[in-house]
Amino acid sequence: MTKLRFYIQMEIKIIGYNSQYKNDFIRLNKAWLEEYFYVEPHDLETFNNIENDIIEKEGEIFFCLIDNEIAGTVAMIKTNEETYELAKMAVDKKFQGMKLSNLLMEACIEFAQQNNAKKIFLVSNRKLKPALNLYSKFNFIEVPMDETDYERADIQMEYTL
């Protein structure tokens, strides 16, 4: 009996913010927050003010599309002229394991470089081992924690451009 091999060609794209995907950004982030923690007031504030707090302040939200379906997302929030915060990275469970977070991370670093940033920082939690491994893979290093609005945050990492 011969084995048949099927190769599925998927179209994977990273795009910038489009308001039609706003609810996907919220849905994907609420999913991981509710799985590991809970949705904090600062999360809700971000979800309710995406355009005002991120896009209109020279930040960006990237979406990963697979065959035009939203598979992942991440935000780059401008904190000052030289610094962006990488925040709210999420990949839909059914697309996890496809290394989509690598593509999102590459988009964030490229965006920061194009905007002449000197540093990207993020806050996370030590129990999110796959996320921490991703950040380390991209040469983020642990730094002392700054004050943060997130109760769940127990680690801060930076990437110097």
Image (cartoon, helix red, strand yellow):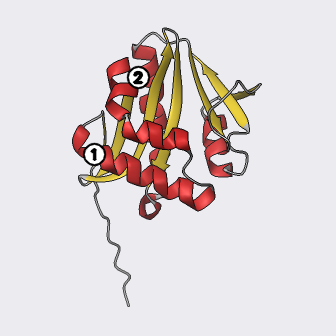
Give the residue number, with chain letter if any, for mark 1. Answer: 21
Q: How far across and down, in percent of the image, does residue 82 sit?
A: 52, 10
Q: Answer whether residue 44 is visible to the viewer in this image.
A: yes
Q: SS for tag 2?
A: helix
Q: SS for tag 1?
A: helix
Q: In the rendered image, which quarter is residue 15 located in?
A: top left
Q: Local crowd at mark 2 within 10 Å, few (<14), some, or many (≥20)?
A: some
Query: Is 118 drawn above or below residue 139 in the view shown?
Result: above
Q: Camera-side residue: 145 or 63?
A: 145
Q: Camera-side residue: 89 or 113?
A: 89
Q: Camera-side residue: 56 or 40?
A: 40
Please tell me which residue is depicted at 30% across the width and 64% down the height of the picture: 8
Query: Is 92 drawn above or below residue 12 in the view shown?
Result: below
Q: How far across and down, in percent of the image, does residue 155 sit?
A: 72, 36
Residue 111 badge: 2
Query: Is 84 drawn above or below residue 117 in the view shown?
Result: below
